[in-house]
Image (tube, rainbow, N blue to C red):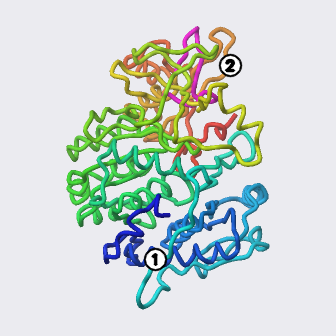
């Protein structure tokens, strides 16, 4: 733990490390609480440990305690279905499960030894225990992917990847121990847990977790000393919608040092509404479960809507054609699959040597499955997933993301998703799935096609428009295109 979180060993003060609502822990008490958890895990010789990852102080203490013990944490999404949870437990075979006292665990966890983590149980003088000596390549986390094309795969993330990613973000964002981060992200994935909890602790800073996201909570925390906000596009969309009626929110965002969006693309329309109301730009970054963070807009650089910045220090990034040739053009139009290489990468998919081998090229580049273009200054713009967002129509390769952004600029469109479907003439035709602002008077195909053609190019206009009441989304707010009606 000393290598990942120096402040836990070096800071005996009453400075707050974690705050969830009215409950908080100083660095000294966090060190003692996590050290106590770690000592119990070491006594049991635990290798992998499940953590019932509710948005709570106990989850943060449990994960830090697992790392203190030199073990690997397997964060469990409390909203997981019975089948998915059973698969994760069978695949990862954790020695036991950590949970907050009083948490009701599902039947699938009934066979595991349970240790209750009471974050505030430490009383009297506090003292930190020495963390277990662990190699940098040792697993820190096993985080399960979304499983859109089969059962979720457990990405084994080494301690080396956690440390290098957080240090690279510190360089890009000028992130220091003086920063106070506020967010309301779930704690069972990379964004909320690694960036949102472990990130501040590695810097020696502080995090205030909202428990449940609200614009009122964001305004309160940013107006009372918080300096950074992490969120996903759904959260920033709610912020953009609320700004006209919440002057305290506008004041809070205007005073923040850094506003960061991730986990999916932030629509340009929401970028512009927030900038117009606050004078501040949201910056974006790009990462995956398997790679942690790959790129980020720098705090001292240009926050350009639609881009995710440049590769982080230590990360190599290239765009590749389907035939394996490199895309070298920096023209904002030439599309290729993103491949990355660097110390931020996972080591393997647990128990899946076949999937691990397929994910890498012979020379060690990870195939992300995301497609992008690069602007003349090298900034990366994600245009979608290779499997669902790369549309081949009329001889062109078209990214769904830019069409979605264009559609969202139409005043009659509340939400939009774009897919391709077979077409005898074009190969694939572009289909727009639209949630209209007014269901009684939705914008028609011709109107939206003209709207897109004026902003992008005629070959990128949708040929079919289908109206929905809502788009299917996962817990992170990402649109689940495979769940759209067939």
Dot 1 or dot 2, earlier in sequence: 1
- Distance from disc 1 to disc 2, alpha carbons, whole Å, reads 62 Å
Give the crowd class for mark 1: few <14, some 14-19, many >=20 residues within 10 Å.
some
Residue 276 horizontal/vertical position (percent): 22, 41
Specify whether 362 is left or right of 30. Answer: right
Q: Nearer the viewer, residue 437 or 265?
A: 265
Q: Which residues are magenta?
A: 383-398
Label of residue 206 in the image: none
The answer, for residue 440, to whether it is visible in the render is: no
- Residue highlighted by disc 1: 128
Residue 317 lies, with reference to residue 398, above or below; the image says below
Look at 35% across and 48% down and name the residue there: 170
Any magenta on residue 77? no
Question: How far from the left and from the top, in percent, is residue 408?
Answer: 41, 34
The reply to whether residue 36 is visible in this rendering is: yes
Asked which secondary structure carries label 1, the reply is: loop
What is the secondary structure assignment of the residue under circle 2? Answer: strand
Look at 41% across and 65% down and name the residue there. Answer: 209
Q: Are marks 1 and 2 in contact (CB under 8 Å)?
A: no
151 left or right, relative to 262: right
Q: Residues within 10 Å of mark 2 (few under 14, many from 20)?
A: few
Of 243 and 36, the residue lying toward us: 36
Which residue is the site of mark 2?
422
Quadrant of residue 36 in the image?
bottom right
* Quadrant into which the C terminus falls: top right
Name the mark nearer the viewer: 1 or 2.
1
Give the quadrant of residue 50.
bottom right
């Amino acid at each position: 733990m000393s290598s990942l979180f120096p402040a836990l060993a070096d800071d005996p003060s009453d400075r707050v490390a974690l705050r969830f609502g009215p409950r908080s822990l100083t660095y000294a008490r966090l060190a003692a609480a996590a050290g106590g958890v770690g000592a119990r895990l070491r006594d049991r010789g635990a290798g992998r440990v499940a953590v019932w990852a509710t948005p709570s102080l106990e989850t943060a203490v449990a994960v830090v305690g697992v790392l203190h013990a030199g073990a690997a944490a397997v964060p469990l999404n409390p909203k997981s279905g019975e089948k998915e949870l059973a698969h994760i437990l069978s695949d990862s075979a954790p020695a036991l499960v950590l949970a907050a006292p009083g948490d009701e665990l599902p039947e699938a966890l009934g066979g595991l030894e349970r240790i209750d983590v009471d974050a505030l149980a430490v009383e009297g003088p506090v003292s930190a225990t020495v963390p277990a000596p662990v190699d940098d390549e040792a697993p820190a986390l096993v985080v399960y992917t979304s499983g859109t094309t089969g059962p979720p795969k457990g990405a084994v993330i080494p301690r080396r990847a956690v440390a290098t990613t957080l240090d690279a973000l510190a360089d890009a964002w000028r992130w220091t121990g003086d920063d106070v981060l506020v967010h309301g992200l779930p704690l069972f994935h990379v964004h909320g847990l690694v960036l949102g909890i472990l990130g501040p602790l590695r810097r020696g800073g502080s995090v205030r977790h909202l428990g449940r996201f609200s614009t009122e909570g964001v305004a309160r925390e940013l107006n009372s000393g918080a300096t950074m906000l992490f969120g996903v596009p759904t959260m920033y969309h709610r912020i953009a919608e609320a700004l006209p009626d919440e002057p305290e929110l506008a004041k809070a965002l205007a005073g923040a040092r850094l506003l960061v969006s991730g986990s999916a693309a932030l629509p340009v329309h929401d970028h512009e509404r927030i900038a117009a109301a606050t004078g501040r730009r949201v910056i974006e970054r790009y990462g995956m479960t398997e790679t942690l963070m790959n790129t980020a807009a720098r705090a001292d650089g240009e926050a350009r809507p639609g881009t995710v910045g440049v590769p982080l220090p230590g990360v190599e990034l290239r765009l590749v054609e389907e035939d394996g040739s490199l895309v070298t053009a920096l023209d904002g139009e030439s599309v290729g699959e993103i491949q990355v290489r660097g110390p931020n990468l996972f080591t393997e998919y647990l128990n899946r040597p076949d999937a691990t081998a397929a994910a890498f090229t012979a020379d060690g580049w990870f195939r992300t499955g995301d497609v992008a273009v690069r602007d003349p200054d090298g900034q990366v713009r994600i245009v979608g997933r290779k499997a669902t967002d790369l549309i081949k129509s009329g001889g062109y390769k078209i990214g769904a993301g830019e069409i979605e952004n264009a559609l969202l600029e139409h005043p009659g469109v509340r939400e939009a998703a774009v897919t391709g479907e077979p077409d005898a003439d074009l190969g694939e035709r572009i289909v727009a799935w639209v949630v209209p602002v007014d269901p009684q008077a939705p914008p028609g195909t011709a109107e939206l096609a003209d709207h897109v053609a004026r902003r992008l190019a005629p070959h990128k206009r949708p040929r079919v428009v289908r109206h929905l009441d809502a788009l299917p989304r996962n817990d992170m707010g990402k649109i689940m295109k495979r769940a759209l009606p067939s």
